[in-house]
Amino acid sequence: MLSCIKKDIPHSASVFQCYGTLLLFLILSFVSTAQNQSHYVFKRTDYFPDGKSYTRLDTIKKKAGEKIDIRFFTFHFGTPHELPVSFSDTLNKNKRLEIWDKPYEPKDLEANWNNSFTYDKEGRLISFGYSGCSTCPKKEYNYTLLYNMDGRLEQIVNTLGRHEMYSFIYDQNGDIRSFTKHAGELEIDIELIK
């Protein structure tokens, strides 16, 4: 018999008094475990020119069917930016496209600018750029994209300006588990912990 049963309390009430706290603890533990499984945890380290670094953990809620891809990093961490709408275009295999801001005006960089996109034989984007212009607020860039043997984007390198390089390492499911940004030196390191 239970040691906490008292003669003046009905048996069912004494069981609840004895085990109610334990039951509540088990329920809260289950809810906590379920919440942890519905979130990603990332370790982000930012490196500064003076040699200092800052590390923090970021918790991001999982969404059904969401992949941890380059767009995931742009949305949640703000980097890399200036990405094109798509990384493939099977209609433009082996082509380089230039899209001018003002297509009917002179194609010069004094007051007009363009975006360029180059595709390989499989229709994968292998470079994209922005020309800039003398009155444009944004600086010009030209990114080259490198793919691994599995056809996954492995690096994006800016050949102009600060020469940023973004690198990605994937897990067996095709999700990015590690992301780094270099601009001469390592600036950002983001790693999926769980």
Image: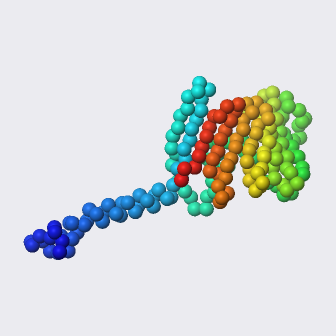
Q: Residue at coordinates 55% horizontally, 47% vertically from top-left?
A: 42
Q: Residue at coordinates 9% horizontally, 73% vertically from top-left?
A: 7
Viewer-nearest residue: 169 or 12: 169
Q: Pinpoint residue 33: horizontal percent, then vertical percent.
A: 43, 59
Q: Which colour scheme is used?
A: rainbow
Give left or right: position of 1 versus 76: left
Q: Pinpoint residue 94: horizontal percent, then vertical percent.
A: 90, 51
* Residue 140 seen by the camera: no
Residue 19 versus residue 86 in the image, above or below: below
Q: Residue at coordinates 21% horizontally, 71% vertically from top-left?
A: 15
Total numbered labels placed on residues in the image: 0
Residue lying at the far top in this picture: please name it.
50
Residue 157 in which image quadrant: top right
Residue lying at the far left in this picture: please name it.
8
Give left or right: position of 169 versus 39: right
Q: Pinpoint residue 172: horizontal percent, then vertical percent.
A: 66, 58
Residue 12 in which image quadrant: bottom left
Give left or right: position of 71 versus 95: left
Q: Pinpoint residue 47: horizontal percent, then vertical percent.
A: 59, 32
Residue 148 versus residue 130 in the image, above or below: below
Q: Residue at coordinates 21% horizontally, 66% vertically from top-left?
A: 18
Residue 36 versus residue 131 in the image, above or below: below
* Residue 118 seen by the camera: yes
Position of the N terminus by quadrant: bottom left
Viewer-nearest residue: 170 or 145: 170
